[in-house]
Image (cartoon, coloured by chain):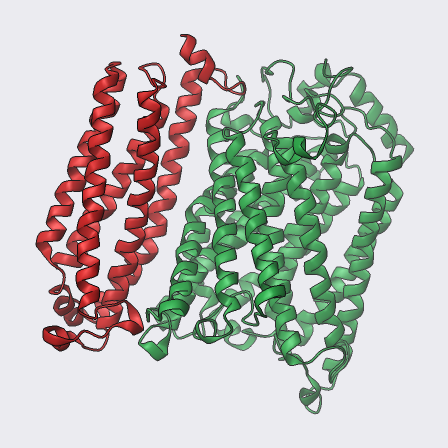
Chain colours: A red, B green
Amino acid sequence: MAETSTTLKHYFVSSAQQFDAAKMGMWLFLVTEVLLFSGMFVAYAVYRVWYPEVFELSSELLDWRLGALNTLVLLASSFTVALSVHFIQRNEKEKVVVLLLLTLLCALAFMVVKYFEYTGKWSHGIFPGAGFAPHGDYAAYYTPYAPQFFSIYFVMTGIHGIHVLVGMGVIAWIVTRAIRGHFSAAYYTPIELTGLYWHLVDIIWIFLFPLLYLI
Amino acid sequence: MSTAGQNYLSASTGVRSWLLTTDHKRIGILYAIAVATFFLLGGIFALLVRTELAAPGETIMGQDAYNQAFTLHGVVMVFLVIIPAIPGILGNFVLPIQIGAKDVAFPRLNLFSWYIFMLGALMALSGWLVIGQVDTGWTFYTPYSAEGTSSVLWLTSAVFIAGFASIFTGLNFIVTVHKMRAPGMAWNRLPLFVWAIYATAIVQVLATPVIGITMVLLFLERLLQIGIFDPALGGDPVLFQHFFWFYSHPAVYIMILPAMGIISDLMGTFSRQQVSGYTFIALSSVAIAFLGFLVWGHHMFVAGQSALSSIIFSMLTFLIGIPTGIKVFNWVATMYKGSVSLKTPMLYALMFLFLFTIGGLTGIMVGVLAVDVHLHDTYFIVAHFHYVMMGGALIGLIGGLHYWWPKITGRMYSETAGRIAAVLVFVGFNLTFFTQFVMGSRGMPRRYHDYAGLLDQYPEFAAYNLASSVGSFVLAAGLFMILAYAVHSLVRGKKAPANPWGAVTLEWTHTGPIPDPHNFEKVPLVTRGPYDFHLADDVLGAAASASSESQDNT
């Protein structure tokens, strides 16, 4: 109970109220994130409906195996972060640290794969927008509105990637707090909130992968 | 303790105690200072525009300077004044006390919002000073904005950043209303101001991210030519307008809903009776918030969207009139057989009723497809949205500031000066903008720096423009008069009692003349509704009789 009293802010009546408020705040923040991405999904939908054949052709340039690998990596990271919430509720603090580190590792793997995908594209002259100039074997992919596809691809995966990086920073921070023993079954709000955020990052990728790589 | 000892102003002193405060009341004052400064700036731009238009031909500036002046007027007034004003100042100060909370749910996030807002604001203004001028208008329409000066980049970044302040403020208020209410403060006992801020917060949270991503895409359009919005690259400029108005139409409800909340509180307090149709007013705020998301296309009737879309958007636009009408009729009904006291805040409430009704009804007019094709891009539109934004949102803010001034500062202002200024504002406002309705309906286009060429065909434009410009200076005189007696009140004002108006919401009945740093000595137990004057005699006691005495004097 000592832990609860140090973490309870004076303007809350109880820890339960404080926890509920924090969780609701996080859910609302996730709603804003969904709407932020929805703008890009709308842009995707509009251009896909207008130029479906361009989108089908251009998506061939994206390697679905790398996309699938990243999907698995992110799903695994969502699982480990969910387990970390589960184990902190049972006060098994060592497991929480291990699981959070595993999550961090998955996130890093995701970014490494993304790095190879991006640099591979760039080496073939595939840039977003006006810089789009595929050469060599890829020259055939230069069609009108193909730049739009890759603009949308780079913007969506880029902003998603920024969210992964932010998530990695946050997870790294709560790992250090978990190691210092800040969390317990009585107080684990930051782990819970980070988990929620991480699931959102995961879910957005779940939509990005088929829309960009598969169809 | 709260009567004899500390209050939130005296609890700690020094610049640091203000800049690092997490007290929602102090953060409200930080917003007040910032917004007042920006309002002065935006007002000066407006006066420059009106001075240029006072006479045909070049008066004080050329066409480029004119384009920049109206762009800055729009950007400053929309993004730095009206959107943050009521939630930032009065929402922060009043809402937590009205629901019996010690603070908002996330006080540090609240302070962070203010800093984000200031960062966005200073970026917007410094971009104009340092990098170059923006002349796109506040709407940043592509392709012009995608090709114009590079300071567009800077300004869109500023709007993006300031947007987060709005999101975090909204998020904070939603959670505060859900989780921080005092025992007994049921949803049907929330003051209508709280309901209005709550509905506003929903719009802030749902709409603002869309302008955020729109600004990011516009930024990338300029930086990398991604070709989403710029037709020269295969993009679609109408898509930009859809994105922009998907935020910016709901944003007008971010601007007007809080003012409606203030008017509801003022009507109840100064009519001294139960606000008529409480549930309807409360839920009509939520209905407006919801419907506001479905009508953005009415800004694009002549922008090349399909006729079918235009018809649907036009019909949905009319629906907004229903919840709005519910509010207006209930406010009028609240005064009926009430004990109406025409104190300065009530004068502004009545002014709101009058001006907002004109603004709202002309909104229905321009929502009619055929009429809008004629009126589009004329001064009729300018007059319409100034009647809503200035005559509605800002008049509501000014009324609210007068109402809560004694609670915020602990001082009274001069009632006589307040009433004279209110008359000046009313006369100046109508002279400025009613003439614009007339000349707009006769075809005077908006955003023109000069109308000398139109005078052969429409000689009357000269007189209307001159009258409008004269009106803008009368309006400015009224506003400066408010500033003057506000400063006088801070220095020399009579000490305010805890409840000078005899109101029965918690901020008046359960706090001292200036609230305690933590609002209440102990969390209040709420046993009645926000306008249950008949149940509040035991709470009001001396304050109520004092207020009725002062009513006799006036």
Q: Work out whether B40 lies above or below B513.
A: below
Residue found at the very far top of the displayed protein: A1
The residue at 45%/61% (across/down) is B245
The residue closer to the viewer here, B526 or B83, is B83
The quadrant in which residue A132 appears is: bottom left
Q: Is residue B407 left or right of residue A30?
A: right
Q: Is residue B275 left or right of residue A197?
A: right
The quadrant in which residue B465 appears is: bottom right
Residue B353 visible in this rendered orientation of the protein: no
Residue B122 placed where, x, y %? 60, 54
Q: Quadrant of the N terminus of chain B?
A: top right
The residue at 74%/83% (across/down) is B56
Residue B73 visible in this rendered orientation of the protein: yes
Residue found at the very far bottom of the displayed protein: B456
Q: Work out whether A75 lies above or below A174.
A: below
The residue at 66%/30% (across/down) is B17
Q: Is residue A179 left or right of residue B98?
A: left
Residue B342 placed where, x, y %? 80, 40
The quadrant in which residue B41 appears is: bottom right
Q: Quadrant of the C terminus of chain B?
A: top right
Residue B272 placed where, x, y %? 73, 31
